[in-house]
Amino acid sequence: MPRVRRSTNRRDSRKKTLQLASGYFLTKSKLYRSAQEAVEKALRYGYVGRKRKKRDFRRLFIVRINAGCRLNATTYSRFIGGLKKAGIELNRKILADLAANEPAAFTSLVEKAKAATAAA
Amino acid sequence: MKTVFPSKGEITRSWFILDASTAPLGRLASEAARILMGKNKPIFTPFLDTGDHVIIINAEKAVLTGRKEDQKVYRHHSGYPGGLREDKVAKVRQVRPVRMVEEAIQGMLPKTKLGKQMYRKLKVYAGDKHPHDAQQPTTLVAQAAR
């Protein structure tokens, strides 16, 4: 086997890692070895976080929609059931936004859901 | 479209009164906790205190169902060996009636700094008087959810 010299490759890859670790606490942004560990962990947390974000937001939407529903004398569960029966396919993100920023529109949706529940 | 989060200054808080003599303690507490946490508002934000203020009156008349009047025990520990103190409801109700309501509600709030902040918006009074008329509180009727 011929001897391999890493030449600039090693420096480049270390530079890349330290770049990713810039702004980290103490040695994590200064020393290659700590930085490498921190970056690996950070990327893994980031991957999990991107999945969690979707769940977390859905939970928040549901809490907000529920609050809007209770202002209109119904509950989240009944409201969503009614929307399904009424064939309204707005997602929870939009519903939560309406509940917060367009209370009138949200109320009319609640009325539609109630009507559909009563009809079914 | 982005989900909006209110900034601290945008949060408006109103005041509500609940009467402890009108509903069982736990149901009253969950209603109060919901308002303190801000879950009654469609702008609820998990990392901010969006809740309203709650005034509880008639804490001395808090309602307990079943045989809790005789059986329920309030425990706390002084920190010294053998320092576990146990008080029956009858004693707590007589000595410090607001404790029953406060403990029930605080137990339903988050155990965080934000939870402590929410708890500070709670005012409990033993009798039917309160000094918060200036805040123009709305009287609520505690009810089972729905």
Image (spheres, rainbow, N blue to C red):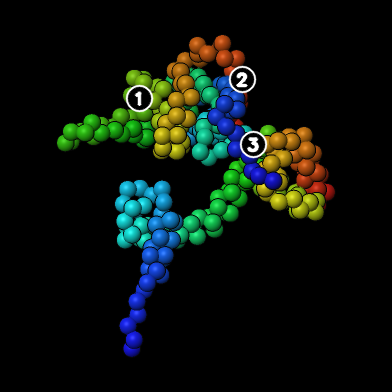
Q: Residue at x 51, y 21 (%)?
A: B55
Whether residue B107 is visible: no
What is the residue that sits farthest to the left in this orientation?
B81
Evaluate whether label 2 is on the same chain as label 3. yes
* Above-or-below relation of B126 to B76: above
Residue type, numbered disc 1 = Val
Q: Which residue is mark 2?
A: B138
Q: Residue at x 57, y 32 (%)?
A: B7
Q: Is residue A24 left or right of residue A48?
A: left
Q: Chain under label 3?
A: B
Label 3, label 1: how far apart the Cα atoms are: 37 Å
Q: Is residue A28 left or right of residue A51?
A: left
Residue type, numbered disc 2 = Thr
First in sequence: mark 2 or mark 3? 3
* Above-or-below relation of A92 to A32: above
- Location of the C terminus of chain B by quadrant is top right
Residue B64 location in percent, x, y?
A: 46, 31
Q: Chain under label 2?
A: B
Residue A60 location in percent, x, y?
A: 59, 45
Viewer-proximal residue, B71 or A10? A10
Mark 2, Cα crowd under 10 Å, few <14 / some 14-19 / many 20+, is some
* Above-or-below relation of A90 to B64: below
Q: Which residue is mark 3?
A: B42
Q: Is residue A20 left or right of residue A97?
A: left
Q: Are marks 3 and 1 in contact (CB under 8 Å)?
A: no
Residue B63 location in percent, x, y?
A: 48, 28
Q: Which residue is mark 1?
A: B92
Viewer-proximal residue, B37 or B58? B37
Q: Residue at x 41, y 48 (%)?
A: A23
